[in-house]
Image (cartoon, rainbow, N blue to C red):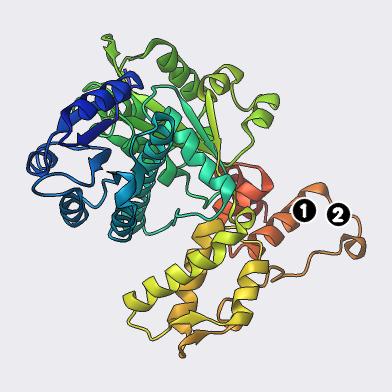
């Protein structure tokens, strides 16, 4: 059952307090009441609330006194002031001093419901931004205080699914921040007390992925010196994040599908079955539907993990976020490297806005960091970014002549690789092959030479 939002009502009029409390409880809120400011402060110090609704005029300490205390000690809790017609001027003063809004008495329930919902959403948005800033400091890679309306809708979706066990598929290009979103879902839901366990499926050798996921008993294989819990068992009560889910081997796909169906695992070398309560979040920068068509990914597993798909747009589709991100990173790296860089020049801003950002936010961060390091003035010029997208001119195949298909493929791979600064992960993504597949092609080329 979803937890009710808790509201604190403060009014010396016990009849009005009881009536308003009853109406809001019928609307699904958990209500606590106080008949005076001192009692309200005592409750504030004992319990957490989403919103405070307080009468402005009360005997002894007034609603303004409660407002001042709340702003100083519980600034994250919005306070809605109730005021009689003759005290509207004081209510406006309350707005200037930190109240979220005011409502004139006698209270119209429809009006109060609208303002109350806005206040709750405002508090949740603040909590989101606080969390994301902490994640940015921790991961040092992404900034998600967005000006993009489409990207902000992601948080509406997360609000609906954050506490559900249903599987979630995060889709988006490399560098868009899928792991940050996964961590955010975990932290904002009812599993936040459990572990968040990330696995990069593409970084684990194919023969080890099952032991990583399901664990193993002592003696299960040559190097199994003791019983070891797998990532699924470690994530029990929390969230397992499977990045690059498309890299799972066919055998591992079958094993994961079995867990999603049965909610149980059998560690390697064991006969005992362990029931687990784990929420699975997966991520990919590939088109899984296309991989299913090509028989490179199981269709039944795809349908299992695609219950709640969330698409994370690339930076080029969030143009309004580019300059705020860039300016934030300039400030960050200027302090970090003790530089006197303060701003980005107008010409450089134009360059940042017109560049395609194939590496997304990760590439933007790296570009700003490099520019701050080499800049000797207060303002970063455009040449400090080195963002030429055509570092190597596109091959003119009409002049090359007829080549064996393998050699033509090799030339094209190297052209893409050079254009992306040798980034194999990004190159593989652009070529719609796995990193393992790209490495194989490059290794095979070396062996034939």
CA–CA distance in space, label 1 to label 2: 7 Å
Q: Give the left or right position of residue 448, taking residue 87 as reference.
A: right
Residue at 48% in and 37% down: 156
Identify residue for label 1.
407
Q: Is residue 228 visible?
A: no
230 w.r.t. 179: above or below: above
Residue at 26% in and 49% down: 76
Are dots 1 and 2 in contact, CB under 8 Å? yes
Q: Quick one: label 2, few (<14), some, or many (20+) residues within 10 Å?
A: few
Residue extending farthest to the bottom is 377
Quarter of the figure with the C terminus:
bottom right
Q: Quadrant of residue 28?
A: top left
Query: What is the number of the mark on residue 403?
Result: 2
| Residue 250 % position (x, y) | 53, 24
Q: Quick one: label 1, few (<14), some, or many (20+) residues within 10 Å?
A: few
Q: Secondary structure at mark 1?
A: helix
């Amino acid at each position: 059952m979803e937890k009710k939002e808790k509201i604190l009502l403060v009014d010396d009029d016990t009849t009005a307090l009881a009536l308003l409390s009853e109406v809001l409880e019928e609307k699904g809120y958990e209500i606590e009441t106080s008949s005076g400011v001192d009692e309200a402060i005592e409750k504030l110090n004992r319990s957490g609330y989403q919103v405070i609704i307080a009468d402005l005029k009360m005997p002894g300490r007034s609603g303004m006194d409660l407002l001042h205390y709340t702003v100083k000690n519980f600034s994250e809790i919005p306070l809605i002031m109730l005021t009689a017609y003759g005290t509207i001027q004081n209510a406006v003063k309350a707005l200037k001093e930190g109240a979220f809004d005011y409502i004139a008495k006698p209270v119209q329930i429809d009006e109060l419901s609208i303002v109350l919902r806005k206040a709750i959403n405002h508090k949740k948005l603040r909590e989101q931004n606080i969390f994301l800033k902490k994640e940015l400091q921790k991961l040092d890679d992404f900034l998600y205080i967005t000006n993009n309306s489409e990207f902000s809708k992601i948080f509406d979706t997360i609000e609906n699914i954050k506490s559900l066990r249903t599987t979630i598929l995060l889709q988006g290009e490399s560098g868009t921040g899928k792991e940050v979103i996964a961590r955010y879902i975990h932290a904002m839901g009812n599993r936040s007390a459990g572990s968040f366990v990330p696995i990069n499926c593409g970084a684990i050798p194919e023969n080890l992925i099952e032991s990583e996921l399901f664990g193993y008993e002592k003696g299960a294989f040559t190097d199994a010196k003791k019983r070891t819990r797998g990532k699924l068992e470690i994530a029990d009560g929390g969230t397992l994040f499977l990045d690059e889910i498309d890299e799972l081997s066919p055998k591992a796909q079958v094993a994961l599908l079995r867990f999603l169906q049965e909610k149980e695992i059998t560690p390697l070398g064991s006969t005992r079955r362990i029931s687990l309560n784990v929420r699975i979040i997966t991520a990919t920068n590939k088109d899984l539907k296309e991989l299913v068509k090509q028989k490179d990914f199981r269709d039944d597993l795809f349908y299992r993990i695609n219950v709640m798909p969330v698409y994370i747009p690339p930076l080029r589709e969030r143009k309004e976020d580019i300059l705020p991100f860039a300016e934030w990173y300039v400030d960050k790296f200027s302090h970090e490297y003790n530089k006197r860089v303060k701003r980005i020049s107008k010409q450089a801003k134009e360059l940042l806005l017109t560049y395609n950002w194939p590496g997304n936010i990760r590439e933007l961060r790296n570009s700003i960091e490099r520019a701050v390091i080499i800049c000797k003035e207060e303002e970063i010029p455009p040449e400090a970014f080195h963002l030429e997208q055509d570092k190597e001119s596109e091959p003119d195949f009409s002049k090359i002549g007829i080549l064996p298909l393998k050699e033509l493929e090799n030339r094209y791979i190297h052209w893409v690789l050079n254009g992306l600064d040798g980034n194999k992960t990004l190159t593989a993504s652009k070529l719609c092959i796995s990193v393992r597949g790209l490495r194989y092609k490059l290794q095979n080329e070396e062996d034939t030479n």
